[in-house]
Image (tube, coloured by chain):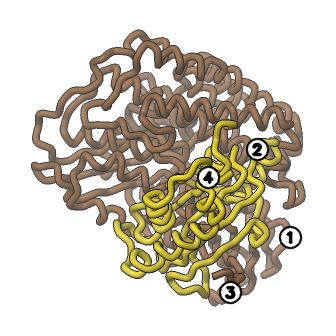
Amino acid sequence: MGKRITIDPITRLEGHGKIDIFLNDNGDVERAYLQVPEFRGFEKFCEGRAAEEMPALTQKICGVCPTAHHTASSKALDALFNVEPPPAAKKIRELMYNAFMFEDHLLHFYVLGGPDFVVGPDAPAAERNILGVIAKVGLDIGKKVIEMRNRIRGVNATISGSSLYPVCGLPGGISKGITEEERDKIKESIKDTVEFARFSLKIFDDLVLKNKKYLDLIIGDVYRHQTYYMGLVDEANKVNFYDGKIRVVDPEGKEFIKFEAKEYLNHLEERVEPWSYLKILYLKNVGWKGFIDGKDSGIYRVAPLARLNASEGMATPQAQAEYERMFDALGGKPSHNTLAYHWARLVEVLYAAERMNELIDDPEITSKKIRNIPAQTPKEGVGVCEAPRGTLFHHYKTDDKAILQKVNLLVATQNNAAAICMSIEKAASKLIKGNQVSEGILNMVEMAFRAYDPCMACATHSLPGETPLIVSIYDKHKKLIKEIKRD
Amino acid sequence: MNDRPKTLILGMGNTIRGDDAVGIEVVRRLREKINLQDLHIKETEEAGFNLLDFIVGYEKIIIVDSIKTSTGQAGDIYRFTQKDFKLSLNSQFSHGAGIAMVFAWAQKLKLPTPREIIFYAIEIEKADVFGEGLTKRIEEVIIPKVAGLIEEELGSCVDAGACA
């Protein structure tokens, strides 16, 4: 009691916040891995429980993005019980989901991605944080982000029963509808979201795109990979976060495959690398060819830029215009420029804002018909949605009393795992030559993976609640030769 | 936020990760014992920037959470104040902000942040495996002990019947 200790960077999940770089005989980079925390035993923990518990249970995997797990889980239950939610229930779920995406993406831009571009890639380490962003965009904008975030969290509390942990998802629908009074309240809360999304795009224009050095970094080769891209699309192949089919395009932008969630095992396969905790997903029907890009490699990417690449546009008018502007500026579609994820994320913010406003004006949103009662014997179900960080799958198998026998989750960051490793490797290769490690490697490596917004949030509960970054560099004999830490 | 009481006791953790729930269990124990004017006792499984919603508007906050250090033994209890933390303002991963960054953000925006923050951290053996329930010693010995320490911390409040 009362003793002083050194709080060292032991984090909650093994491999957390750790990048391993392996050098070859010449002392150049051979391979790099971002260690992604694994879900130890979650699937086993779920087995033997009632499937209906899953929407509330799975969101506790992570203290930050539970709405995605809740939604994928609710949809898996629809499939498990073979029951279609009424249109109003789907629209309310989609409204909740777009509110979540809007808030999550906005926070990433201002707080997490901001240091890379709003503050600047060459800014001193001490300024590359939220305080640096506020200094650049101004206190009023900082306050507006918080005020906007609070309102959107309020919207989701109204819809789902909680601003963070939704409790509304049931097989065949939702537990609570939206009253006319609640509709008015939500409408008021979201009325300036489109305007704020446009304002955020303007900040990106002014501070990033008009800076030639930053623009060169975005369109340059350092962070570029020609991969496949995957995302959910509606019937017109437009981006949809909540529902649709999964579309994959090849590195030239041609449709490679489009499939339903329940078919995912036919198209995606997991792989484990000996030097990593990562379970890497790749396209089964292209095959694993190693950490290389190109049409012959099964590596694909997900999340904002990938979603836009995998689609044929946005389903709302202003987002569609921004989509076209972005791809024009990047030299066409698909764009392989990893740092353009930040731009694509803002296009999605605008889409989410427009879609929320569309849905709240839909006369059906206040319908009292919000659930169809399951009447069939459950067996197996797969649910999918687009988490902010990419496509998320929940797959459940049960006995005929809906007791879980098998659970499989493919989380968003797994999809991008191989690409993240390649991006880190490419960035590191520029700064490590002949066993000599140049200064600045942390910034370059950070920028490589932060564009993907990989989710490590499972680890942020325990004190001190943050994620020191440790880059470990090993020689050809796998002997540690240097460790660089940013805490 | 002006209608908030002056003091908050916040238990943090994840109730499906075994002993990681210790912070939440401590405040549940306290809630059974203490009911004071001007005192909120809350629990949360949230993390990162979502903690902002909890810290703004109070004058004093006592946070109870698990901790994992390289040398500690499960059940060790630590008491920190802000000055004990050498914390980073950098956030490497998605929404993975530490407490320092959340406070720095709130202070920079001139939001009303607490003048005093006390952390009670309880060493746990592991938190990377899913499961319900706590280990016996944490449940039967450590939780009552930490609850008692926090009651002592609130001593004058308890005597006065309010945390004024």
Q: Of the residues shown, which amino acid type is indicated by label 3?
A: Leu
Which residue is at a point 10% across and 42% down the rendered structure image?
A377
Parent chain of label 3: A
Q: Are marks 2 and 1 in contact (CB under 8 Å)?
A: no
* Residue A443, quarter of picture: bottom right
Residue farthest top in this picture: A363
Of residues B73 and A350, the one nearer the viewer is B73
Side of A43 where A96 appears, left or right: right
Q: Residue A415: x and y, percent?
A: 49, 53
Can marks 3 and 2 be said to lie on one chain?
no
**Secondary structure under the numbered disc 3 in the rendered image:** strand
Write down the residue under mark 4. Answer: B162
Q: Of the residues shown, which amino acid type is indicated by label 2?
A: Pro
Write down the residue under mark 1. Answer: A439
Residue B31 visible to the viewer:
yes
Q: Are marks 3 and 1 in contact (CB under 8 Å)?
A: no
Write down the residue under mark 2. Answer: B112
Mark 1: few/some/many CA within 10 Å (<14, 14-19, 20+): few
Image quadrant containing the C terminus of chain A: bottom right
Q: Chain B: what color?
A: yellow
Side of A369 where A156 appears, left or right: right
